[in-house]
Amino acid sequence: MSFLNKIKTFQGGVHPEEYKELTENLPFEIMPDPKRVIVPLSQHIGAPASVKVKKKDEVKKGQLLADQEGFISSPIYSPVSGKVVDVHLEPTASGFPQNSIVIDSIESEEEIRFEQLDPKTITAEEIRERVRLAGIVGQGGAAFPTYVKLTPPADKNIDCVILNGCECEPYLTRDYRFMLERSEDLITGLKLIMKALGVSKGAIGIEDNKPKAIEKLTKLCMNEENISVVSLKTKYPQGAEKMLIKAVLNREVPPGKLPLDVGVVIQNIGTALAINDAVCKGEPQITAALTVSGFGIKQPKNLIVKVGTPLSDVLDYCGGVKDNAAKVVVGGPMMGVAQYDFSAPVMKATSGILILTESEINAHEETPCLRCGKCIEVCPLNLTPTKLARYSQLEKLEEAEQLGITVCMECGTCAFVCPANIPLVQWIRLGKKRVLQIQRERKAS
């Protein structure tokens, strides 16, 4: 039964070429274990995990490698059985080296799991504790520790959970494949999230370029009185939290506020499945589901990969890169990070690896601003990107702060439409970082 009377989209946004056809009809493959894994201690927002193993230790698949350090942190488990080679700085897909646990894997059937729990009788507290222990982080990109989201402050009145099935970035199809291949587990995961938060309303927002997923999940929810499947307009960044809440519930999240402040918790499709697996199968989060795509890879695939697998191993498994490959991006093309070192590992929230050719990058030389206003028209948060970027360039940080630079979610729509090819979002990101640092220093003093 639907409790949503009217579906809206949001103001602004863009519709880039999708390129979903490269992988949308390819079922998941499970990639074999790599010979060596590199497991960073910080695969989440918050404090890095605290190491619990040392060099030359033998570990089993599913064994605790590093425990959470503070409330906003997350434990990390061994994705393979093997021997610890070292704990030291290693490159990561973020572009910044991190302390990582390096393990040489061995073939072994041994595996450590948690006790399986019944999703029908489990309590809210037991769900939160299992999610915490399993090291689950958000799969939407930010990698926020999920149990923190399931433990909102007492003064926040949460009345709805929305699963983000938009997958609005081009190329990526892992969430789409999950919705088709693991539909029932997905509904169980949503129910567990709803129970953990004590809410009775749930929704799954899916862009209308995924009709098979909408049809399948709608049929499964026909007898679910409090869960609705909501078809949304295909537009980027439809999957951003504030945009999704606006489209599904027509609620506005004020600047500087969170979904919690309007009674909503958003979770990704992959996060809901990770919760299902942690509760029903006793699995810690030691794998990542990702799309390998782009016209520069020989064999595009949707893969289940062990956390810590080097990017180079994934590319080799997909047949290697073509001669005309020009750029490798981890994540989606709008918000992903270009790679310079393919020894960097897959992490918990890695959603895709894109191998792009020159024609896909469509790079052009930057020219002076044309004052066309296109960046303002498409900004989903009603900001003025051209001014924010200019203030950042000129280090006029006080003016940038007053104009709302910290509100920017760095979606990249402004840079996408800019006919002058100005790297607007990159300048804004730099200025935002500086302003946030100033704000922290201001509070500290």
Image (cartoon, helix red, strand yellow):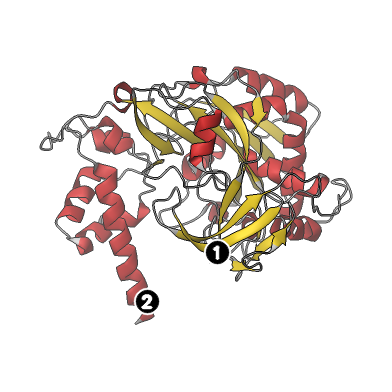
Asked whether residue 239 is in view, the answer is no
Would residue 237 appear left or right of 41 to someone viewing this image? left
Taking the spot 17% from the left edge, 50% from the top edge, the residue there is: 390
Work out whether residue 149 or residue 343 is closer to the camera in this orientation and state it: 343
Would residue 348 appear left or right of 374 to someone viewing this image? right
Compared to residue 83, the image places residue 323 above or below, namely above
Would residue 171 appear left or right of 191 to someone viewing this image? left
Q: Is disc 1 placed on a helix, strand or loop?
A: strand
Which is more foreground, mark 1 or mark 2? 1
Q: Counting other residues with Cα less than 10 Å from the Cα at mark 2, is it few (<14), some (14-19), or many (20 or more)?
A: few
The spot of residue 269 in percent (x, y) is: 63, 38
The spot of residue 104 in percent (x, y) is: 63, 51
Q: Determine the image quadrant of residue 421.
A: top left
Asked whether residue 331 is in view, the answer is yes
Name the disc covering residue 443, or none.
2
Q: Determine the image quadrant of residue 354.
A: top left
User: Which three-letter amino acid code belongs to the residue tagged 1?
Assistant: Val
Q: Is disc 2 placed on a helix, strand or loop?
A: helix
Name the disc covering residue 87, or none.
1
User: Which three-letter amino acid code belongs to the residue tagged 2?
Assistant: Lys
- Quarter of the image for the C terminus: give it: bottom left
Q: Counting residues from the N terminus, which is met first, the one under dot 1 or under dot 2?
A: 1
